[in-house]
Each structure stands twice: as structure tokens, then as C-alpha cells.
Image: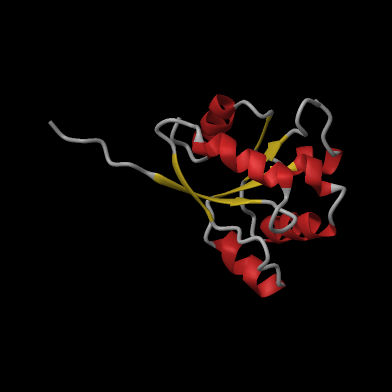
Amino acid sequence: MFEEETRVHDLFITHNGPGDEEYISFIQRLLEAPDFEWKDHGVPGQNQEEELEEQIQASQVVVVLSGLYNRYPEVKKQVKIARDMEKPMLLIRPYGLEEVPVELEEWASGVVGWNRVCIVEEIEEILGLY
């Protein structure tokens, strides 16, 4: 029998730099997702505009942790670059909350909470795989 080829999903996950707790928690959720291979092209600490452009360009989907959006200008810059590149964006609601910044919701290809099954399904749906 043929083995199904594993597809690696190229993501850029918004962040505020090394040690960002919300970013680390989100990464942990994705690591726990069975049968979901992914790579985060975002590199906390490498946030010059040119570096961010390269990281975002290499991604298929930009995952926006909306809880960080209004708190950190760095995340707003990442979202602006993604929008300029017309990258699809998956918006993750702040943990335990429903409300998200209105402009983010308008730009997003999808909006989900922190349930890893929903996150994986939405990424695959955005990519036309589900």
C-alpha cells in the first residue's frame, strides 16, 4: 500500500519576541495536534522589516494571536506586512474571550478560539485541504 505523504504547513505565527507566553502556549497547542506537520517561519527576535518580510513570504498562512494585536506594535507591523502581501490570515481569539479587534476580523480568512482541532481544521480549510 502507498503511504500518504505528510504535508508540512508553512505558518507565520505573530509574536512579540522570545519568551512571549501567549505565543509559547499557542505553539504548545500545535505541537499536541496529531497528524499535523507545520513549520513556523516567524523568528522571535528577528523583527527588522526585511527579516519579517522574508519570514511572512515563506508562509502559506499567517496566524494572528489577536490578544497581542493591540498590546504590541510589533504584532501590528507583522499584520500590516501580511496584509500588504495578501497572505491569508487565521485569527485566534484571545484565550477565553470572544471579542476580537474589528479590523482584524474584517481581514481574517477565518476566526477560531484555542481549540487545537478547530485551529488545524481552519488552517486546512484556508489552504483548501479540508
The number of numbered discs placed on residues in the rendered structure image is 0
Horizontal side, residue 2 vs residue 18: left or right:
left
Image spot of residue 60 (x, y percent):
53, 51
Depth check: give the residue in front, 17 or 5: 17
Image spot of residue 9 (x, y percent):
46, 46
In the rendered view, tell whether residue 16 sits above or below residue 113.
below
Coloring scheme of the render?
secondary structure
In the rendered view, tell whether residue 121 sits above or below residue 17.
above
Image spot of residue 7 (x, y percent):
37, 44
Depth check: give the residue in front, 46 or 2: 46
Which quarter of the rendering shows the N terminus? top left
The structure residue drawn at horizontal position 39% and vertical position 33%, both measured from the top left corner, is 35
In the rendered view, tell whether residue 103 sits above or below residue 80.
above
Depth check: give the residue in front, 106 or 68: 68
Which quarter of the rendering shows the C terminus? top left
The structure residue drawn at horizontal position 77% and vertical position 41%, both measured from the top left corner, is 66
Q: Residue furthest front?
A: 19
Horizontal side, residue 2 vs residue 70: left or right:
left
The structure residue drawn at horizontal position 75% and vertical position 55%, both measured from the top left corner, is 16
Q: Residue furthest left?
A: 1
The structure residue drawn at horizontal position 70% and vertical position 36%, both measured from the top left corner, is 92
Image spot of residue 19 (x, y percent):
70, 53
